[in-house]
Image (spheres, helix red, strand yellow):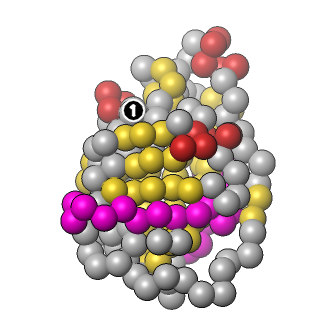
């Protein structure tokens, strides 16, 4: 994801403290398939009322929202919808060449915080953050993010770390479990 190159942008916090909690012994029943229509994360001041569809690009990598839509998250349509059994994957920018973006306050998110995903059927899938991980893009945990799960889970991906060659060097991943 391209990042701004202004001195102000380079001073923005772009790191999180890795943290984890135990997964609940019992999860709520999975929800039926329903497309995500937005994203709310009160701890980070996120309240998006739109969701883009994302696929796999020509380079074999997961697409990201265009820089012109830095305030809009995206959902990987190759996976389950948020609330279904499995790992639903959402992507949102920390910043773009246009400046701070939707996940600019990701450092404020802590284990236990809620992530709400409104859905086309009128329901909202509510998740609790179980783990926060910052990892270099070259060490991206593909299986951990996209691997099969026995319960409804969410992965929210954004960028972090320093800027190198116009891009953030790391990914920040929020792993969350459906709580209702």
Front position in the image: 56 or 15: 15
Return the residue at label 1. 70
| Above or below, 146 relative to 106 | below
The secondary element bearing badge 1 is classed as loop
Front position in the image: 163 or 92: 92
Q: Farthest left residue? A: 121
| Above or below, 164 relative to 22 | above
Task: Indicate whether residue 82 is drawn in magenta.
Answer: no
User: What's the residue at 49%, 82% (across, down)?
Assistant: 28
Q: Quadrant of residue 161?
A: top right
User: What's the residue at 66%, 87% (across, down)?
Assistant: 25
Q: Farthest top residue? A: 7
Query: Picture coordinates of residue 12 (x, y %)?
Result: 66, 24
Query: Picture coordinates of residue 152 (x, y %)?
Result: 47, 77
Query: Picture coordinates of residue 20 (x, y %)?
Result: 75, 65
Task: Indicate whether residue 131 is drawn in magenta.
Answer: yes
User: What's the residue at 67%, 60% (across, down)?
Assistant: 112
Q: Would residue 161 be found to the left or right of residue 30 on screen?
A: right
Query: Picture coordinates of residue 75 (x, y %)?
Result: 34, 56
Q: Residues within 10 Å of mark 1 (few under 14, many from 20)?
A: many
Q: Quadrant of residue 168?
A: top right
Q: Quadrant of residue 34?
A: bottom left
User: What's the residue at 60%, 87% (across, down)?
Assistant: 26
Which residues fall within the magenta stretch? 120-144
Front position in the image: 127 or 151: 127
Q: Would residue 108 be found to the left or right of residue 121 on screen?
A: right
**Residue 138 seen by the camera:** no
């Amino acid at each position: 994801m391209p990042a701004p190159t202004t001195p102000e942008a380079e001073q923005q916090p772009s790191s999180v403290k890795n943290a984890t909690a135990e997964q609940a012994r019992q999860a709520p029943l999975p929800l039926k398939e329903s497309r995500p229509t937005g994203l709310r994360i009160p701890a980070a001041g996120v309240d998006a009322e739109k969701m883009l569809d994302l696929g796999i690009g020509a380079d074999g990598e997961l697409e990201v929202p265009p820089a012109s839509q830095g305030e809009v998250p995206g959902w990987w349509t190759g996976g389950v919808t948020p609330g279904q059994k499995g790992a639903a994957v959402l992507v949102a920018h920390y910043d773009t060449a246009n400046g701070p973006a939707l996940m600019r306050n990701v450092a404020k998110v802590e284990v236990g915080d809620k992530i709400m995903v409104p859905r086309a059927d009128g329901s909202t899938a509510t998740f609790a953050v179980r783990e926060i991980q910052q990892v270099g893009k070259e060490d991206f945990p593909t299986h951990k993010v996209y691997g099969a799960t026995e319960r409804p889970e969410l992965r929210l991906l954004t960028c972090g770390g320093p800027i190198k060659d116009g891009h953030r060097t790391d990914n920040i991943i929020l792993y969350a479990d459906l709580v209702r």
